[in-house]
Amino acid sequence: MKTKTPVLKKGNSCFSQTAVKMGAKISISGPPRGLYLVIGNGPIASLVSGAGGQIVMRFTADKLLAILSYDGFLALNRESMISRIGPVNLDMERFKQLSQGLSKSVVPSPGAT
């Protein structure tokens, strides 16, 4: 006869009783702050700001890069208006080279031939 292994979830009384009996303290934390790509199902700037985020680059009303705390990331991850959110890692040396290259490029002014 097979026994079913219980699924432990936060708030599950079995999990809480076990944790209390064992004196367990579980804490999951991420980086203090990070850069995240946030994609929503409509305008999301106010949600990001409300989660303590700083908008770094806005691609469209529903896509942006933001600096968020880990708690801010978790809060937005639970929002129904957010369809995707994930960390972005930049190679700062390559980013610096790209920025320098872009700043040296010449954009013709309107009406120039």
Image (cartoon, rainbow, N blue to C red):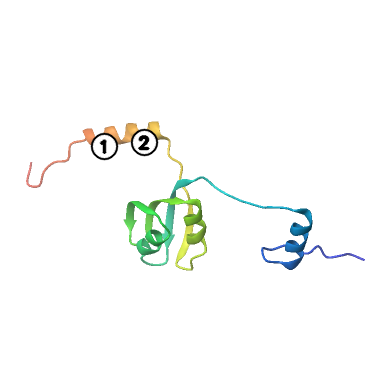
Residue name at image x 17 percent, y 40 percent = 107
Q: Is residue 111 left or right of residue 2?
A: left
Report the residue at 75% width, 53% height from top: 23
Dot 1: element: helix
> Which residue, given by chain and number where applicable, does mark 2 sit on?
95
Query: Considering only vertical position in the picture, is 31 above or below 50?
Result: above
Label 1 crowd (10 A; few <14 / some 14-19 / many >=20): few
Question: Quick one: SS at disc 2?
Answer: helix
Res 60 quadrant in image: bottom left
Q: Which mark is residue 112?
A: none
The reply to whether residue 7 is in sight is no
Q: Which quarter of the image is occupied by the N terminus?
A: bottom right
User: Front-most of 22 and 15?
Assistant: 22
| Quadrant of res 47 | bottom left
Q: Which residue is mark 1?
A: 102
> What amino acid type is highlighted by mark number 1?
Leu
Q: Choose mark 1 or mark 2, whichever is in front.
A: 2
Badge 2 amino acid = Phe
Crowd band around label 2 with a 10 angstrom C-alpha radius: few (<14), some (14–19), many (20+): few
Residue 10 lies in quadrant? bottom right
**Residue 6 appears left or right of 65:** right
Q: Residue at x 47, y 61 (%)?
A: 76
